[in-house]
Amino acid sequence: MAKLEKYVTFVLDRKHVALDPRRNGSNRGVSIPAKDIINETDPKTGIINKRVAVYNPSNGQRSLFIDEWANYKGETDFRLISAPKITFYDKVMILDPTRHDLLIKYFRIMNSNGSNPERDPSAEVMFIEESEAREAEDQFDFEELTSRAIGFIIESREENLIQLSELLGRTTLDRNNVPLNEKELKMDLISYSKRNAQEILDIIGDPRLETRIQINRAFELRIISYDKMTRQILWNDTKEPVISLKVRKGLLPKDVLVNYCTESGGTGKEIYNDILYKLGVESEDNYIMEENPDVIDKFTPEELVQAAKDAGILLQSGAYLFLDSKSSENQLSKGKGGVIKILENDGEHNGVNLKSYLIRKIKLAMNAKIAND
C-alpha cells in the first residue's frame, strides 16, 4: 500500500478572523493576496533581488515567479490579472500536497507567512504553517547541521580553530588575555555552533576560505583598514585605496574584498598577491627562477610582477605601484585594471615601456646576485 503524504495545515493569525460562509455579511472570509514580492539575497554579494510571485495554476502555468513565465506581457498579462482569489473561510486551511502543491509552495514563500524564515519582517503576518511533519523535518535539519558543524570542530587542528574563531568574530583569549587552549577553543565554538551551525558550515564550505582567512588577517594586523567616512578599503601604510570600489551600505568590507580578489580576474589576483606579500605569506603564483636572466623575457605579466617584488624593485602593485623606492617621482599613478593590465597592454610609464623597464631592472638585479655568489 502506497504511503500517503501528510496534509499541510495553515492557520490564520490571531488578529484575523474568518467568518463561516453560511453567515450573513460582506466579509465571509479572509483574503490572501495572490501576488507577493519576494526578496532573495545573493549569497555571494549580499545584494537583495526582488522577484514577483503569483499564484495562478491556470493554463498549465507551474512557475510562481513571473520572470520564469514564457512570453510574459507585463501588467496586462492574463495570467497575472486572472489570478484567483485565495480565501480562508475558517481559521484553518488544510491542503493536500497531491492536489495543492503550487498553493503550498506559494504560501511557504509569502511574506505574510509568519513561519517563513526568509520573510520580509516589515510585512504583516496573516497566517502560520502548522505541521508536525514539517516541524519534525525542520528539527531534523537543525540537528543534522549542528552535528556536522560540531564534527568539523572536534576534528580540527588548533590553528584552524583560531582562524575559524577570528572569522566568526569570536575571542581567542580568556578574561585575563591569555590565549585559549585547543579544548577551550573547541568548547567555545561548539557552544556557538548550537545556535549558528549554518554560519559555520557556510564558512568552512566556502571555496574562498583561504582567501577569506588571509584577508581577515590583513585587517586584524592593520595592514588594511576601512574608512567609514569614504566607505573605502585602504592600505594602512599609504592610506591609498586597495580597490577603487566603495563598500555599499549593508555589506561588510571584508566580504567585498574577498569577492573582488576571487572574482575580478587578473586585477583581483594581483591585489590578493599584494596582501599575501605584506603578510609574509608565499604567493600562489610561485615559480622557479633559473640563474639565467634571459628566462625573464618569457615571463607572464603575473610572474614578472612577482619577480619584481622579490627583487625589491616593485614594492606594491594594485592601486599604486612603487618602483625602486617610495619617493613620489617613482610612483606610477592609478591605471585601469592595475599593473598586470598595464603589462598585458604593453603600456608605458613616463614614456618608457613598463614591461621592458621591469625586465631590464630584474636582469640587472639577477646579474648582480650571480656576480656576488
Image: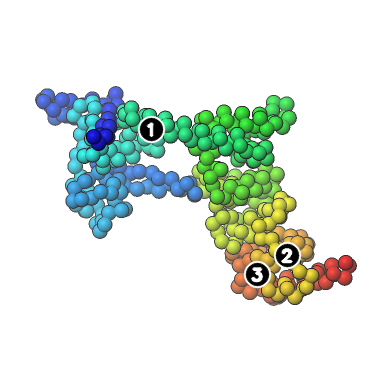
Residue 1 appears at what percent x and percent y?
23, 34
Nearer-the-camera pick, 119 or 303? 303
In the picture, the quarter occupied by the C terminus is bottom right
Q: Amino acid at mark 2?
A: Ile
The residue beneath circle 1 is 137
Residue 213 screen position, x and y as percent: 63, 46
Q: Is residue 157 above or below residue 234?
A: above
Q: Is 109 situated above or below 263? A: above
Name the residue at 71% across, 52% down.
281
Which residue in the structure is indicated by mark 2?
288
Q: Residue at x 63, y 57 (%)?
A: 271
Q: CA distance from mark 1 to mark 2?
A: 54 Å
Residue 161: image location, x then y, percent? 64, 37
How crowded pointer 3 is (Cα within 10 Å; few <14, some 14-19, many 20+) is rated as few
Q: What whole-number distance in Å separates the C-alpha atoms at marks 1 and 3?
A: 53 Å
The amino acid at mark 3 is Thr
**Position above or below: 306 against 138:** below
* Secondary structure found at label 1: helix
- Say how many tags the image has: 3
User: At 78% from the left edge and 62% from the top edge, which residue is drawn?
Assistant: 312
Which residue occupies the foreground of this view, 176 or 288? 288
The reply, left or right, for residue 300 in relation to residue 248 is right
Does the residue at mark 1 contact the one at mark 2 (Cβ under 8 Å)?
no
**Given this view, does label 1 or label 3 mark the residue nearer the observer?**
1
Of labels 1 and 2, earlier in sequence is 1
Q: Position of residue 15 (x, y in %)?
A: 29, 25
- Which residue is the site of mark 3? 300
Question: Would you say residue 173 is visible in this rendering?
Answer: no
Q: Residue at x 67, y 45 (%)?
A: 217
Classed neighbour count for the residue bearing mark 2: other residues with Cα under 10 Å, few (<14), some (14–19), many (≥20): few
User: Which mark is in front, 3 or 2?
Assistant: 2
Sequence order check, earlier mark of 3 and 2: 2
